[in-house]
Image: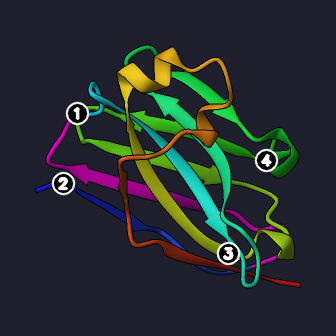
Amino acid sequence: EVQLVESGGGLVQAGGSLTLSCTVSGFTLDDYAISWFRQAPGEERKGVACISSIDSATYYATSIVKGRFTISSDSAENRVYLRMLSLEPDDTAVYYCAAVRQAVFRATVNSPLTLNYDYWGQGTQVTVSS
């Protein structure tokens, strides 16, 4: 059974940091690229960052990340991380991880954050207080 489970969310003050984890099962990171998305109340879901563990290729939504977030992976643990620094109240959202097949990821000429993802986690809440 395929599962993606997010963890690490919580309440943090502005300027603080959090590291989110996405633990996957039912497939390996060699087969799927993993992305982080977020959805704030009343807003559309937006892509944040993507990683392909085969070659550690990464992609960021620079307008959102602004150099503050880092995506990484641990293939041995089947886990992907999103390290978030200098958090702002506008970062408050439910953060989701999602998986897309490596073949699809590598074939796209557009942003990998716009692909149709195959699997999604349930999300983890991040709240940044001012």
- Does the magenta segment cover residue 16? yes
Residue at 72% in and 68% down: 44
**Residue position marked by numbered label 2 in the rendering:** 2
Q: Secondary structure at mark 1?
A: loop
Rendered position, 106 above or below 52: above
For marks 3 and 4 on the same chain, the one whose residue lies earlier in the sequence = 4
Which mark, by number, is residue 65?
4
Q: Amino acid at mark 1?
A: Ala
Q: Residues within 10 Å of mark 4 (few under 14, many from 20)?
A: some
Over which residues does the magenta segment extend?
13-28
Image quadrant holding the C terminus, namely bottom right
Residue at 55% in and 51% down: 36
**Residue position marked by numbered label 3 in the rendering:** 93
Q: Amino acid at mark 4?
A: Val
**Residue position marked by numbered label 1 in the rendering:** 76
Q: Secondary structure at mark 3?
A: strand
Q: Residues within 10 Å of mark 2 (few under 14, many from 20)?
A: few
For marks 2 and 3 on the same chain, the one whose residue lies earlier in the sequence = 2
Residue at 76% in and 83% down: 42
